[in-house]
Image: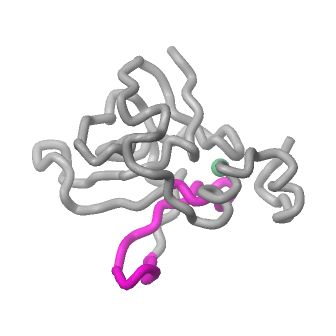
Amino acid sequence: MDKSNLTEEEWKTCLTPEQYKVLRKAGTEAAFTGKYYKHHETGMYVCAACGQELFSSDTKFDSGTGWPSFTEPVNRELVELKEDKSHGMIRTEVLCKNCGSHLGHVFPDGPKEKGGQRYCINSLSLDFKKS
Ligand code: FE
């Protein structure tokens, strides 16, 4: 099923209410509550909404923030970065380019030796495919 063009009503029927709030309403799960922040298996994290491959476990690191953190997407073309001025901050929002769903934010305080980026992604926005 092509999920790049669903209406919000259609999204509601194929996501859980918690996923809908994060993926379609740019919500944020509470820190240290998601299923992937402490997850260390080898494989691929994909968009929970459309299944697009997004982040490899090779780029995952423990940021101590309570959210899954990655130094980079598996391919920069697969995510969209957008300025986000909500909540009185200027941040860079990360979206799935395939379906437009909200994933999280990217911050310039990641590991220096790996490019210095920290993609801070909600567990609710991800599914995991073990390799
Ligand atoms: Fe997606």
Q: Residue placed at 55% from the left, 60% from the top?
A: 95
Q: What percent of the width, then of the height, locates residue 61? A: 27, 35
Horizontally, residue 32 falls left or right of residue 19, namely left
Q: Residue placed at 49% from the left, 32% from the top?
A: 35
Q: Is 100 inside the magenta-drawn segment? A: yes
Front one among 73 and 42: 42
Q: Quadrant of the N terminus?
A: top right
Q: Is 124 inside the magenta-drawn segment? A: no
Circle count: 0
Image vertical order of residue 106 relative to residue 36, above or below? below
Residue farthest to the top, as pictured: 131
Q: What percent of the width, then of the height, locates residue 64? A: 23, 42
Q: Residue 27 appears in which quarter of the rendering?
A: bottom right
Q: Residue 83 appears in which quarter of the rendering?
A: bottom left
Image vertical order of residue 49 relative to residue 62, above or below? below
Image vertical order of residue 88 relative to residue 81, above or below? below
Q: Which residues are magenta?
A: 83-103
Horizontally, residue 9 falls left or right of residue 57, namely right
Q: What percent of the width, then of the height, locates residue 88? A: 37, 84
Q: Residue placed at 61% from the left, 43% from the top?
A: 47
Figure coloring: one colour
Q: What percent of the width, then of the height, locates residue 6? A: 84, 59
